[in-house]
Amino acid sequence: MEKTTIQMVRQDLKSKRDALLLAHEQLKKDSDDWNKCIIVLSLLTGLFESCKIKMGWDSDVVALVPVALSSIIASVSALIKFKKFPEQQEVILQAQSLLTHTLSNARNQDDLSHSLLKEYHESLEKLETSIYPDIRKKFLRQSHNNLISIMKQETKFFNLINKVNNGENVENDDSLSSNSNERNPLSIDSPIEDSI
């Protein structure tokens, strides 16, 4: 869908930047999980070696266990290298940085200028080359759902602020509080200043 207003460009940039952040978060989690696996296997190998020496185990099978564990560690390390987690994260961070810069420029303009539109298209190209389409689709869907949820929550929040400032009594809303037993901070006894 073609973006024809500055507001549409801002929303699109925000959702695409968030999608990249979600993709980066997932890559980091995957990388951390693989590295934890290597750490655990290394510790198990060391533990087994210590037990073998202390207990005096000397059978052929016992001698093969550390070799097998070391081979597994080497295989996992090679797999991590093959998956190129750091390189993928760097590409995503570069694209995310460009999108953030373009979003900042869009927030500082009132109209959609030719130069901003050009910068927007360059950002989209960087995004499209940073992650595969199926991955982009998955994280864009998550990003869109998150942004819609945030906007609904903000609307509810500002409606409650308007009610409080108009002197209306506001019912306790569990979606705005982490603990439903807390005293309602948006009661008529505690008006919110207009400067907030």
Image: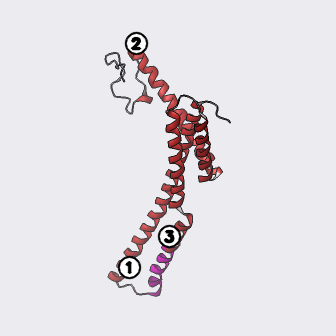
User: Does the magenta run of residues contain 60?
Assistant: yes
The crowding category of the residue bearing disc 3, from other C-alpha atoms within 10 Å (few below 14, some 14 to 19, many at least 20), is some
Residue 179 spot, x, y in % from top left: 37, 32
Callout 2–callout 3 Cβ contact below 8 Å: no
Coloration of the structure image:
secondary structure
- Residue holding disc 1: 49
Q: What residue is shown at x 34% (from left), y 24% (from top)?
A: 185
Which element type, helix, strand or loop, lies under badge 1? helix
Circle 2 sits in a helix, a strand or a loop, which is it?
loop
Q: Which residue is mark 3?
A: 77
Marks 1/3: CA–CA distance: 21 Å
Left or right side of 93 for 124: right
**Amino acid tagged 2:** Asn
Query: Which three-letter amino acid code belongs to the residue tagged 1?
Result: Glu
State the residue in front, 196 or 65: 196
Question: Is 163 above or below relative to 83?
Answer: above
In the displayed structure, 115 sits above or below 175; it is below
Q: Which residue range is magenta in the image?
A: 58-73
Q: Main secondary structure of the magenta part?
A: helix
> Disc 2 designates what residue?
166
Disc 2 packing (10 Å; few <14; some 14–19; many ≥20): few
Q: Residue drawn 38% across and 75% down?
A: 46
Residue 170, position in %: x, y?
40, 18
The count of marks equals: 3
How far across and down, in percent of the image, does residue 107 sit?
Answer: 50, 33
Task: Mark 2 or mark 1: name the one nearer the start of the chain.
Answer: 1
Closer to us: 153 or 93: 93
Q: Which mark is residue 175?
A: none
Q: Earlier in the sequence, mark 1 or mark 3?
A: 1
Q: Nearer the viewer, mark 2 or mark 1?
A: 2
